[in-house]
Amino acid sequence: KIASGFAMINAICRVPPKDSTTEVFWVAHDRGVARWVRNPAAQDLDSPAFEAPQLRGGRAGEILDVAVTTDGTRVAGAGADGTLRLWDAETIAPLWGAHTYAGVDAGANASASAALLTAAFHPRDANRILCGTSRGQIAIFDVRAPQQKRALATA
């Protein structure tokens, strides 16, 4: 058992290793995200060193999923409140503030956010982040213009 100090762990994502001296994991939890760095040669997992990233606009809130680019340079967090956040994986500094996804054709609930349940970087274009939503849609964020979101209908 690893004592993390978080009430709930929602997802864990391993970063592709750059060398054999460290392993890096990103953890989505009830209060945001945290980076866990450990020496893979160490057998003791009981004392992980969690580092919380800096946040723009306050606390992240519950992050349901976390994704890392294939080159390990950026981390995205999908929020229960409908926000997507992006951090530099090395410095854990925010690369943008929170961007909210309200959904497409939300009708009477147009102002209400749809929870972002999952996150994944596009495998061939790390500037695109795909998120599964609580409205049954796939939201597509472009890192270069995050305020311009698209959605794919799944039905």
Image (tube, helix red, strand yellow):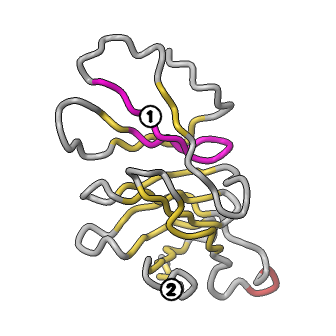
**Numbered range of the magenta stretch:** 25-39
Q: Magenta segment, principal secondary structure?
A: strand
Vertical comparison of 49 with 92: above or below: above
Q: Residue at x 50, y 86 (%)?
A: 150
Instruction: Determine the secondary structure under disc 2.
Output: strand
Q: Is residue 109 left or right of residue 154?
A: right
**Quarter residue 120 falls in:** bottom left
- Residue in the foreground of this view, choosing between 117 and 50: 50
- Residue in the foreground of this view, choosing between 36 and 115: 36
> Which residue matches tag 1?
36
On residue 85, which mark appears?
none
- Which percent across, then down, holds residue 89? 40, 53
**Quarter residue 96 falls in:** bottom right
**Disc 1 crowd, CA 10 A, few/some/many (<14, 14-19, 20+):** some
Q: Residue at x 56, y 63 (%)?
A: 85
> Which residue matches tag 2?
150
In the rendered structure, does residue 34 fall within the stretch colored magenta?
yes
In the image, what residue type sits under mark 1? Trp
Q: Is residue 151 left or right of residue 6?
A: left
